[in-house]
Amino acid sequence: MESNKINYVELPAKNLALNKAFFEKAFGWSFQDFGEEYTAFENAGLDGGFFQADFASRPKNGAALVVLYCSDIEQALARVQECGGVIEQEIFEFPGGRRFHFLDPCGNEWAVWSEPA
């Protein structure tokens, strides 16, 4: 393990089971539970977890934005919607690529990006 590198991220979830089901289906993540109020995610590119909380992580409230990469952004957007995510910002271009923002079932905001079309 490297010193001085981001190693783990934790996010709130009002309903752990609902968020686990969403990320398993939408992105293929797996989970390991640690009691009833915490679950760690795996196969997500960066290790982390969800903790039981009655609030959500949103950049407009000062939280960091977690950005996922997907080579097929249209497919990712469709999968997010099919699995119960809410599109917060449709696909848009930015210097370096394209991305969209979505809310997971617990209200946390995420983004997905890909290379330019």
Image (spheres, rainbow, N blue to C red):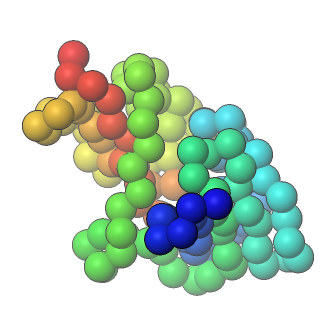
Question: Extreme bottom residue here?
Answer: 54
Q: Quadrant of residue 60?
A: bottom left
Residue 61 visible in the displayed image: yes
- Name the image quarter holding the C terminus: top left
Residue 106 visible in the displayed image: no
Number of marks drawn: 0
Residue at 65% across, 68% down:
50
Residue at 60% across, 36% down:
26
- Name the image quarter holding the N terminus: bottom right
57 horizontally vs 42: left or right: left
Question: Extreme left residue here?
Answer: 95
Q: Along the line of sight, which residue is nearer the eye, 117 or 108?
A: 117
21 is higher (above) or lower (below) than 9: above
19 is higher (above) or lower (below) than 90: below
Residue at 44% across, 29% down:
70
73 horizontally vs 27: left or right: left
Where in the figure is residue 84, as x and y percent of width and height? 56, 44
Where in the figure is residue 92, as x and y percent of width and height? 18, 35
